[in-house]
Image (cartoon, rainbow, N blue to C red):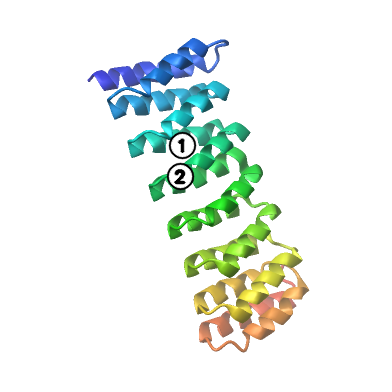
Amino acid sequence: MLPLLLGALLHLWGSWAWSQPGVGAGVYALQTMLQDSNPEIRVMAVRALGRVGGRQGVASLQLGLRDNHARVRLEAVQALGHVGGDLAMTVLTEALKDREPMIRRQAVEALKEAGTVRSIPILHSALGDSEESVRLHAVMMLGKIGHRNAVPVLSQAGLTDASAAVRAAACVHLGRIGVKDPRAVEVLARVVADEPVPAVRVRAVESLGLLQLAAAIPALEVALGDQDDGVRIRATETLGHVLARDWD
C-alpha cells in the first residue's frame, strides 16, 4: 500500500515540478529516493525524474542506470529517451553496456527517440554488440530514423554482420532510405554477388528495385543467374519494374 501511495505522490510532484523554476532541492529529494530499499519506489522516483527532465533530471537518471534491479534500469532508459537531447543521448551510451540484452535493446530505441539523426553515430556503436537481437534492433531504429546519414552504417551491417537476419534487415532498410543514392546500389550489388544466404540476396534484390536508379539494372541482371530459384524469381519481377520505371 505504501509504495502505491508514494508512487502517486511522486507522480504528482514530477508533473508539478515540470513547470516550476528552481526545483533543485526537490530534484535532490527525488534523487535520494533512488537509494530506497524498495525497487518499486525507485521505479516511481525514476518516472518522476523523467517528467522533471532538464539537466538535473538527466543527471539523476544516470544514477538509475546503475541500479542493481533491472526494472529500475529499464525505466531509467525509457525516461531518458522521453527527455531527449544531447545530454540524455550521452548518458544513454552507458546503457548500451548494460549486462542485460533487454536493457541494451531499450537503450537503442531510446536513443532513436532522444536524438533522431544525431543518434546515428551512437547507434552505429550498437552494431558491435555481441547479442544479435540488439544489433537487429539498432538496424530497425536506423531504418525508422530514415536519414541518409545512416546509409554507410546500414551498408556495413548488410555486408559484414555475422547474423543473416541482421544483414537482411540492413538490406531492407537500405532500400527504404537509399532512394537515388548510388552508395546503396553499390552495397546491394555486392550482396547479390557475394552473400551466401539466399534469403538475404532476395532482400537485396527487392531493395535494388526501390532505389529508382538505372544503375541497379546490372546487379539485377546478375541476380537473374542466381542458383536459387527464389532469387531468380524476385529478380525477374524486380527488373521488369525497374525497366518500366514504375516509380515515375
Identity, as a three-letter code, of the amino acid under mark 2: Gln
- Indicate the position of residue 156 as horizontal and vertical percent values: 62, 64
**Is 175 situated left or right of 11 in this image?**
right
Give the structural element (helix, strand or loop) at label 2. Answer: helix
Q: Please report contact status of discs 1 and 2: CB closer than 8 Å, yes or no.
A: yes
Of residues 38 and 242, the one nearer the viewer is 38
Quadrant occupied by the N terminus: top left
Identity, as a three-letter code, of the amino acid under mark 1: Gln
- Indicate the position of residue 168 as horizontal and vertical percent values: 53, 68
Image point 56% across, 40% down: which residue? 113
**Image height of 214 relative to 80, above or below:** below
Q: Which residue is mark 1?
A: 78
Identity of the residue furthest to the left in this view: 1
Of residues 43 and 238, the one nearer the viewer is 43
**Image height of 211 relative to 140, above or below:** below
Image point 73% across, 79% down: which residue? 217
Mark 1: give few (<14), some (14-19) or many (20+) Cα within 10 Å. Answer: many
Quadrant occupied by the C terminus: bottom right
Numbered circle sitting on residue 106: 2
Q: Is any part of residue 248 visible from this angle?
A: no
